[in-house]
Amino acid sequence: MIARAGLLAAALLLGTPAASQEDVDQGSAAIAADLAGDWQIVPTDGAPACRVTLGLAPARGGWQASAEVLCAATAPAAAGVAGWTFEDGMRLLDATGATLMRFEEDETALPSSPSVAAPAFYLVPAIPGFARLRQPAEWEGTWQITTAGQKPCVIRFGPHEQRDALHQGGSVTIERCRSKALARMDHWFLEGMQLMLAGPDDAQIAFAPDGADTHRSDDGRWRLGPGQGLGPRG
């Protein structure tokens, strides 16, 4: 998501007066080529995610796109998608070029609709095996964090609560862990699609979905998954 956000930032530069029409056309085509492919619309309420495919054939207002049948139930506004563009944010278009859904990016480069302030949907590159966004109450329970060459860390997430105006989370109890960095973590909270582990002195580790029920840390070092035996609720 971060890499593709950089592409969207580059797209804004194409609209400056210094950019020639040829620069704009070539730059837009290159950015579109990098953004094209399978994406997922992810409802924030835990409803099933649905797939949209961003193509490169010309369409009214941008390039061709299509949505799977599931989108009609999950994200009804996207059911008639026929095109897409990154002009003025990532937008899904109908056959006339009118906007069906518009996604804004926040500081974490997560496209949200209808707005960053009140997201009902996220738009992310398709994640193999990922089906829905885990809800706050579903995180309570035992989890394990694995990394190459080490025994798993076993941790327990406490019941969720409203930690501040924007975040829900809960306590973290370390049951078994040899990693000093992970052993410092004492609470969890949710930020967009990420699960954040946090501890003293502003220590934080972000985990993003990378499968049906697993999350990978932002540096790729650790993988978070359900604990053996007593799994997470939900």
Image (cartoon, rainbow, N blue to C red):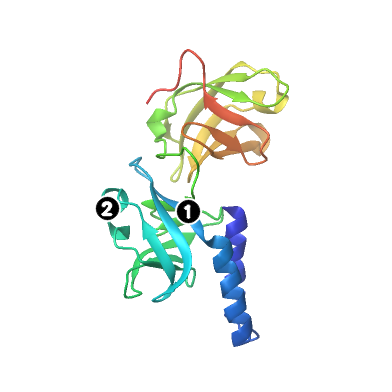
Amino acid type indicated by mark 2: Ala
As drawn, 155 above or below 194? above
Q: Nearer the viewer, mark 2 or mark 1?
A: 1
* Dot 2 crowding, Cα within 10 Å, few <14, some 14–19, many 20+: some
- CA gap, disc 2 and disc 1: 17 Å
Residue sitting at x 70%, y 18%: 178
Residue 150: quadrant of the picture: top right
Q: Which mark is residue 195?
A: none
Image quadrant in which the C terminus is located: top left
Residue 44: where, in percent of width, then height? 38, 45
Which residue has dot 1 on it?
Answer: 38
Residue 108: where, in percent of width, then height? 56, 53
As drawn, 209 above or below 142? below
Camera-side residue of 3 and 63 = 63
Amino acid type indicated by mark 1: Asp
Residue sitting at x 48%, y 44%: 193
Residue sitting at x 50%, y 44%: 127
Which residue has dot 2 on it?
Answer: 72
Q: Are marks 2 and 1 in contact (CB under 8 Å)?
A: no
Residue 55 in view of the camera: yes
Residue 190: where, in percent of width, then height? 48, 39
Q: Secondary structure at mark 1?
A: strand
Q: Secondary structure at mark 2?
A: helix
Camera-side residue of 57 and 132 = 57
Residue sitting at x 54%, y 67%: 32
As drawn, 102 above or below 224? below
Residue 116 in view of the camera: no
* Marks 2 and 1, the one that precedes in the sequence: 1
* Dot 1 crowding, Cα within 10 Å, few <14, some 14–19, many 20+: some
